[in-house]
Image: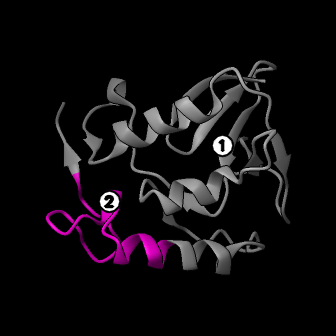
């Protein structure tokens, strides 16, 4: 069961285990640490709406933990919805390969191309950069 959404790509289970959505990178949103990225608040809020107090299913890849001790996972809702993919489709995260964890790289990359062509989220023309997220800090 999801206990707390930390930002747009990280959450904590009721057990205290932290989960990092693998294969994607959402804009940063941790206002207690300083400036936040454009769309960081939106990504965190969207993930919270999807996951808050929900049971989730985790699919692991080659590496189980990152250097911070978080579990790396592809996350699914009970409905079967693939959360990592949904964030990319909405333009609230970009694809970030984490070799050797590459199982859904092609699927995520295709979803990102579509989000870019539709100018969704971070891919809005007025703020878009080459990768959609570089140096987009906003003070809030």
Q: Quadrant of residue 33?
A: top left
Residue neighbourhood size for the residue with mark 2, other residues' Cα within 10 Å, grouped as few (<14), some (14–19), many (≥20): many
Q: Position of residue 78 (x, y in %)?
A: 81, 38
Q: Please report the residue visible at 81 percent of the width from the left and 20 percent of the height from the top.
A: 15
Is 16 or 48 nearer to us in this picture?
48
User: Position of 77 compared to 8: left or right?
Assistant: right
Is 95 or 77 nearer to us in this picture?
77
Q: Please report the residue visible at 46 percent of the width from the left and 52 percent of the height from the top.
A: 26
Instruction: Check disc 1 and report its element: helix, strand or loop.
Output: loop
Q: Quadrant of residue 134?
A: bottom left
Residue 25 visible (yes or no): yes
Is 13 or 35 nearer to us in this picture?
13
Instruction: Check disc 2 and report its element: helix, strand or loop.
Output: helix
Q: Quadrant of residue 4?
A: top right
Q: Image quadrant for the C terminus?
A: top left
Does the segment drawn in magenta span residue 80?
A: no
> Residue lying farthest front?
79
92 lies above or below 19: below
Which of the two labelled residues, at mark 2 and mark 1, occupies the earlier sequence position?
Answer: 1
Q: Which mark is residue 122?
A: 2
Q: Position of residue 84 (x, y in %)?
A: 63, 55
Q: Position of residue 109 (x, y in %)?
A: 56, 77
Q: CA distance from mark 2 to mark 1?
A: 26 Å
34 lies above or below 1: below
Which residue matches tag 1?
A: 68
Q: Position of residue 81 (x, y in %)?
A: 72, 50
Does the segment drawn in magenta span residue 123?
A: yes
118 lies above or below 36: below
Q: Image quadrant for the N terminus?
A: top right
Q: Which mark is residue 6?
A: none
Q: Please report the residue visible at 66 percent of the width from the left and 76 percent of the height from the top.
A: 107
What's drawn in magenta, residue-wise?
Answer: 112-136
């Amino acid at each position: 069961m999801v206990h707390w959404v930390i930002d747009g790509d990280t959450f904590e289970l009721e057990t205290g285990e932290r989960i990092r959505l693998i294969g994607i990178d959402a804009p940063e949103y941790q206002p207690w640490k300083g400036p936040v990225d454009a769309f960081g608040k939106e990504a965190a809020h969207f993930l919270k709406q999807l996951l808050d107090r929900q049971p989730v299913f985790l699919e692991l890849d080659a590496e189980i933990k990152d250097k911070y001790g978080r579990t790396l996972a592809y996350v699914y809702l009970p409905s079967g919805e693939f959360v990592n993919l949904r964030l990319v489709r909405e333009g609230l995260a970009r694809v970030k390969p984490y070799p050797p964890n590459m199982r859904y790289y092609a699927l995520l990359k295709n979803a990102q191309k579509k989000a870019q062509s539709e100018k969704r989220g971070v891919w809005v023309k007025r703020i878009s950069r080459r990768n959609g997220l570089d140096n987009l800090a906003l003070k809030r």
